[in-house]
Amino acid sequence: MAVLGKDVQYAKTLLTAGKLVAIPTETVYGLAGNALDPQAVATIYEVKNRPTFNPLITHTDSLEKIAAYVESVPPLAEKLADAFWPGALTILLPKMPRLPDTVTAGSDRVAVRVPQHPLTLSLLQQLDFPLAAPSANPFNYISPTTANHVQQQLGNKIDYILDGGACSVGIESTIVGIENNKIVVYRLGGISIEDLERVSPQVLLRKKESEESPTAPGMLKSHYAPSKPLIVGDLVDLIPHYAHTKVGVISFRNTFSQVPEDHQRVLSASGDLNEAAQRLFSVLRQLDQLPVGVILAELVPNRGLGRAINDRLIRASA
Ligand code: TXA
Ligand code: MG
């Protein structure tokens, strides 16, 4: 099993030797390797069991460092970096050839992010290479938001998990590109559309694409899924409909008297969408581990981080 700890020096030693280390970020835990080392990058795909057409995000501690790996940084990207980095925003920028093609799965754009977590920022500051890191879950499962989540699923495949506690945002970063001087959102996430609109008023939402299309692999349909079937709808109708089955219930604010309390999870009793996002993935994992046949969930208000929560719920139910 992997060792859990807060030893940034040890993480640095492993990464420098081409090994993988799970790292905490404010969004979800990442499975990190040296982005400049094709062998380390290949190991990331292997450990995650991830198809090689699905590219990885490259992490550094500053826009200045990222500038060494991209051809140019458009003014709007710089504004976004100023506004949100370190933070839950990933920006697609034109890639330099020195980054291995496997990091971007052959795309001429690389996804870059400066994550907001003291341990990981300190690690990135000490490295002379950027870290390629997808979420530290096996392909198609729910992203990990604690070190233990990583341990449970990848613990036998990596040596070390940098333990930074529970992720404060709890949902993956928002991925944007800059096209015709406008922000195009490829994946909803920890930075809301409303936040982006404060930087540039016109924000376009890239339509979901089918599994066959490699142009926006972030939109693969059956991402983030628990192993139990997840049904999303109106709980007032769904709960009586599944009365003959043991169900787990994920609600936004309220509990339901027909379902045993320990089979229910409320995302935020006070109706706080940030708290709901923070809890979503761990709640999905908890219910997935209960002896229930099906998980029922309701959508949350479609604003702020609610949009990203609903996106994940709908995809997990696909
Ligand atoms: O919050 C996050 O973004 C976390 C933490 C660890 O940073 N990372 C994460 O990585 O969620 P991952 O690999 O699970 O999801 C990244 C998504 C993938 O769906 C991938 O298709 C998309 O980003 N992506 C990466 N590079 C891309 C590129 N060059 N063009 C288009 N999409 C890209
Ligand atoms: Mg992922």
Image (cartoon, rainbow, N blue to C red):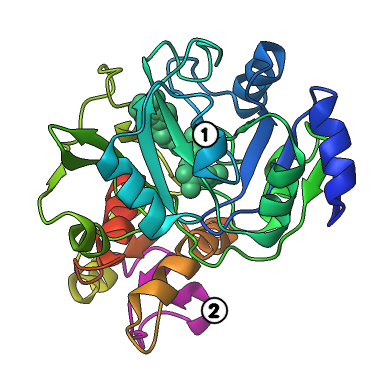
| Amino acid type for the residue under numbered disc 1 | Ile
| Amino acid type for the residue under numbered disc 2 | Asp
Q: Which residues are magenta?
A: 242-266
**Above or below, comparing residue 212 to residue 92 in the picture:** above
Q: Are marks 1 and 2 in contact (CB under 8 Å)?
A: no
Residue 20: give its label: none
Residue where numbered disc 1 is placed: 66
In the image: residue 299, left or right of residue 3: left
Tag 2's secondary structure? helix
Q: Is label 2's Cβ within 8 Å of ligand 2?
A: no
In-front residue for pair 200/252: 200
Percent of width and height locating residue 222: 36, 36
In-front residue for pair 165/48: 165
| Residue 316 within the segment the image draws in magenta | no
Tag 1's secondary structure? helix
Percent of width and height locating residue 309: 33, 60
Residue 262: give its label: 2
Q: Mark 1 against mark 2, which lies toward the viewer? A: 1
